[in-house]
Amino acid sequence: MPEVGSVPESWADDDQLFAALKEAVRAARAVPPEFVEAGKSAYAWRNIDAELASLTYDSTRDLVPSVRAETASIRALTFTSAHLIIELEVSGESLHGQVVPAGEGTIEIQTREGVAATVGVDSLGWFPIHPIPASPFRLRYHTSDGTDVLTGWITL
Amino acid sequence: MRDDPSVIRLVERARDGDQHAWNELVVRYAPLVWSVCNRYQLNRTDIDDVGQTVWLLLVEQLGNLRVSAALPGWLATTTQRECLRVLRAARRYDLTSSPEDSPVSPDQADALIEEEILAAELNAALRAAFADLPARCRQLLSMLLSDPPLSYTEISATLSVPIGSIGPQRGRCLERLRRSPYLATFSDHEIVGGETHDTRTSDAGGGQRA
């Protein structure tokens, strides 16, 4: 490993530096152009308007292993934004959600292909999603009073 | 390179809506994402799937300064985690393989990822330094870098320079490359603390990130 603050000492030698440059160019050429283009187009998913809700709890990540084993069939996720919380629970083939504080509105299900579906959120903040969308997906919650919250990408 | 101001600037510009800056980031680090996926021996469809997810997650994280300051590390660990997710999903339908039957053990993965991050940073810095060279140097070095390399005779004819001057010119161009500001900003290869470390710790526990 090179010293902190420096490139490898061997690069003082022309042939070594040239070999390193050759490897750097080779590594970039090995990547198919479509792979790079797909990465560029991911930028279209940049969120501009909605408030972001980030993942603050994931049962598969945050439970200790012994507990996790007992509850493995249920996956619980919590997304938190500055103003509200969206909780998700996955068991088997069903996915349910709860918005806190509760408020009627809609949940838009976004996949990489675009908006896959829209479901209603009832006055208790409850919403069902069926079938479970293809991963990754994310949820956008709208209400008539202007609430607009977008979760991070979810992979199940 | 975590402190590389040019990477941080690119992330800031991408966060502020500059598609070109985003493209540059993708071009710069796609080889890193690609090489991690190849280590897990994923098929092409799965690699594309992982790549898409990694870039989507990065778009979402553009405002997160801890990520932008450690971008290569974040990309490598995120890619690794997504590769493992794909492998786990595939295994659910393949009862012949055991749960431990991953091509890479966690310890190996930790060591390999450090190497990959370092190599990716060095490579990205070298490519950026190369792109920043005067046209004449880029031209000469490209000819020498082509596979198979052009002979001095061919280079002499193409560039209209004496054969005897090619060696010394190569030396001068490599010296310019060595002194490039892109390589001068190279520093601090330790991958510790912050987002990178947190993420990897949860991987080691077999965690699956949403």
Image: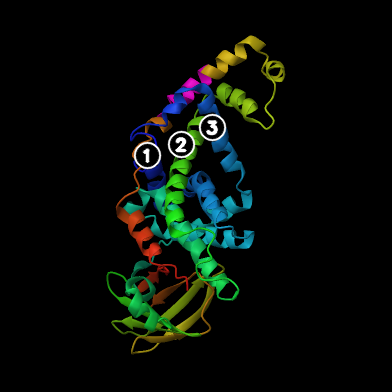
Q: Which residue is mark 1?
A: B4
Looking at the rendered structure, the kind of residue marked 2 is Ala
Residue interval drawn in magenta: B172-181
Q: B168 and A81: which one is in front?
A: B168
CA–CA distance in space, label 3 to label 1:
19 Å
Q: What residue is drawn where x is 48% and y is 85%?
A: A92
Q: Secondary structure at mark 2?
A: helix
- Label 3 marks a residue whose chain is A
Q: Which residue is mark 3?
A: A21
Give how far across and how far down residue A108 sits, in percent.
46, 76
Q: What residue is drawn where x is 35% and y is 61%?
A: B201
Give how far across and how far down residue B59 sits, in percent.
44, 57
Looking at the rendered structure, the kind of residue marked 3 is Leu
Asked if residue B71 shows in the view, the reply is yes
Q: Which residue is mark 2?
A: B125
Q: Please rate how many residues cluster around mark 3, counting C-alpha atoms within 10 Å: few if below 14, some from 14 to 19, many from 20.
A: many
